[in-house]
Amino acid sequence: MNQLDRRLLGASLSSLALSVGLLLWGSDYTRPGDAPPLTPVASESSTPVKQRRLPDNTYLTYPEWFLVFSPREYAAFAREHTPTDFPYLGHLAQFWTGYAQANKQAQPYGFNFDYHLMNFIIGASTTAEFLVKASYEATVGRVSDALAFGSMTEEDHFSARQSADYAKLLDTKAWYDYPYFEDLKALWRLPVLGAGFLRKWERRYILSTDYAFKGMYGHLMYQAARASYEPEVPQTALVDSQGTMHSLPRYQAFQDDALALARQGVQFREIAGNRQGIMVCYQAPAGTPKVPEGSALLFTQPLLTQPQLQRVVLRVPIDQLHRVLQELPVEHVFDF
């Protein structure tokens, strides 16, 4: 482990004590299923070695993707509401408890240091960010919201659009690729006068601070990532039941292409060299969720801004993924 890794690990672990309380408190926000972890089974793979990825990656990607789901939920909420009442602490609890539940499924494969290091780094920064935002919005934000009589300013609408753009970028790229400084410039091109004058300037202050800090921090993280890790292979190898190998894009686009193949009657045998299980999530009404035959319920999380809905996280046998993609409104396939 190089010196940079040690520093990042130390910073990440320093936030863990603070996060433990949130994790325990978060039991109301993440409900575990009853699926035990799979026992790893050795099998021959027809996927080239360079295109294989570890089987635990499908579970350990959950924290990353929760930080896509959360901005999506915020963007939908912010279209009609100011962020004063957004459940930052609830989302923080869901981040850590979702990570804990997913990690239970990853444990039989051993400790994946690089992936856990990354998750603790993003967990540390997310913990700090959400605690600051929750505190700020509960005090200064609530006062400015009251002074504007709850009406949304141009800056509030700008923030909602920015969040939607950010969530869309995360489908295919890392968060530090987002052009925060461009948003900062666009924010200050908005009219400086208008209804809710105090709210307008309070929002300009907090959004400017947010975009400037994330722009600088994102640049540092980009440099650290490039210095510490090799660039990722942007494709996922999928072997069908006939032994034909398909090269699919990664991240959200993987799901779209896999669904297209499933609709053509293609059945899957192997993904990134793995044949056992892959993690999938979908949104469903609150209550007892549908679990397809052969799949296992790992955990559920309520959508905190839409309590009538929940996110259902399943483990699906790879040879059944084609069927699940067609039966359920899948939100995401965690493609290793």
Image (tube, grey):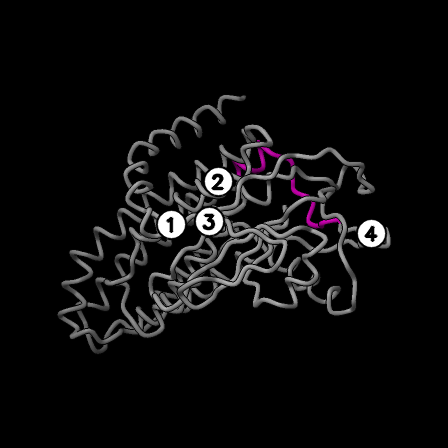
The secondary element bearing badge 4 is classed as strand
For the residue carrying disc 1, how many other residues have a C-alpha within 10 Å: few (<14), some (14-19), or many (20+)?
A: many
Q: Amino acid at mark 4?
A: Met
Residue at (36, 65) in percent of width and height: 159
**What is the CA distance from the residue labelled 4 to the residue labelled 2?**
35 Å
Q: Quadrant of residue 23?
A: top left
Precedes in sequence: disc 4 or disc 3:
3
Q: Mark 1 highlights which residue?
A: 94
Q: Amino acid at mark 3?
A: Gly
Q: Nearer the viewer, mark 2 or mark 3?
A: 3
Precedes in sequence: disc 2 or disc 1:
1
**What is the CA distance from the residue labelled 4 to the residue labelled 3?**
33 Å
The residues colored magenta run 223-237
Which percent across, then down, holds residue 71? Answer: 42, 59
Q: Mark 4 highlights which residue?
A: 245
Q: Mark 3 highlights which residue?
A: 33
Q: Amino acid at mark 2?
A: Met
Tell me the tag on residue 221: 2
Which percent across, then down, holds residue 90? Answer: 31, 53
